[in-house]
Image (cartoon, rainbow, N blue to C red):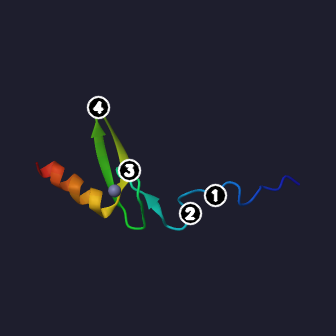
């Protein structure tokens, strides 16, 4: 009988929409990148704009 409440717990990532890790804009096209911070790496999602900036920063 424990019915899950619907509509009260909407997740932001429904509908193929992602939030950019850097600028926090919503985007439906993301690039999956691996960022290195200190000694560990973590995977994040970047919008096309931040992705190109990130690429440029890699190249120096
Ligand atoms: Zn972005």
What is the number of callouts on the image? 4
Disc 4 is placed on an element classified as loop
* Residue shown at the point (38%, 67%) measured from the top left: 29
Q: Nearer the viewer, mark 4 or mark 2?
A: 2
Q: Nearer the viewer, mark 4 or mark 3?
A: 3
Q: Which residue is mark 2?
A: 14
Disc 1 is placed on an element classified as loop
Q: Which residue is mark 1?
A: 10
Disc 3 is placed on an element classified as loop
Q: Are marks 2 and 1 in contact (CB under 8 Å)?
A: yes
Measured in 3D between alpha carbons, the distance from the residue under mark 4 to the one under mark 2, in whole angstroms, is 32 Å
Q: Which residue is mark 3?
A: 21
- Residue 6 in percent (x, y) is at 74, 60
Q: Residues within 10 Å of mark 2 (few under 14, many from 20)?
A: few
Q: Which sits in the foreground, 51 or 2?
A: 51
Q: Nearer the viewer, mark 4 or mark 1?
A: 1
């Amino acid at each position: 009988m424990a019915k899950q409440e619907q509509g009260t717990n909407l997740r932001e990532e429904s509908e193929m929409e992602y939030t950019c890790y850097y600028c926090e804009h919503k985007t439906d096209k993301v690039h999956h990148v691996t960022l290195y911070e200190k000694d560990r790496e973590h995977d994040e999602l970047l919008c096309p704009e931040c992705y190109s900036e990130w690429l440029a920063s890699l190249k120096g």
